[in-house]
């Protein structure tokens, strides 16, 4: 019985850690994509100013 309880506890911990890791990965990916977009906009603006 205690073994089953321990297994369940570890399973929940692993699941929780997995969700946290997944959430962090998605958040960082979204941030990176957002920053890349903003950076591209800035670069484009700079280039158009330099060309004119």
Image (spheres, rainbow, N blue to C red):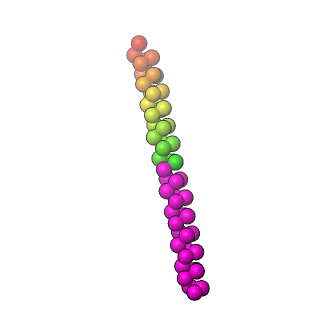
Q: Where is residue 48 in the image (x, y as percent from the top left)?
A: 41, 18
In the rendered structure, which segment of residues is drawn in magenta?
1-26
Q: Quadrant of residue 50?
A: top left
Residue depicted at x 45% and y 34%: 37
Is residue 6 within the magenta segment?
yes
Front residue of 48 and 36: 36
**Residue 49 position by quadrant:** top left
13 to 47, vertically: above or below: below
Q: In which quarter of the image is the N terminus?
A: bottom right
Question: Left or right: 16 with respect to 45?
Answer: right
Up/down of 5 relative to 31, above or below: below
44 vs 7, nearest the viewer: 7
Residue 46, percent from left and from top: 46, 22
Residue 9 image point, x, y percent? 58, 75
The verdict on residue 33 being magenta is: no
Which is the main secondary structure of the residues drawn in magenta?
Answer: helix
Task: Tell me residue 22's x, y (percent).
Answer: 49, 56
Toward the viewer: 22 or 6?
Answer: 6
Specify the farthest residue to the bottom: 1
50 left or right, relative to 21? left
At a point 45% along the width and 28% down the height, the residue shown is 41
Residue found at the far top of this picture? 52
Q: How many marks?
A: 0
Q: Give the side of residue 44 with respect to residue 16, left or right.
A: left
* Quarter of the rendering occupied by the C terminus: top left
- The residue lying furthest to the front in this view is 1
């Amino acid at each position: 019985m205690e073994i089953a309880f321990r297994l369940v506890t570890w399973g929940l911990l692993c699941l929780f850690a997995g969700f946290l890791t997944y959430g962090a990965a998605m958040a960082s990916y979204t941030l990176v994509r957002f920053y890349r977009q903003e950076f591209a906009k800035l670069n484009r603006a700079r280039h158009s100013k330099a060309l004119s």
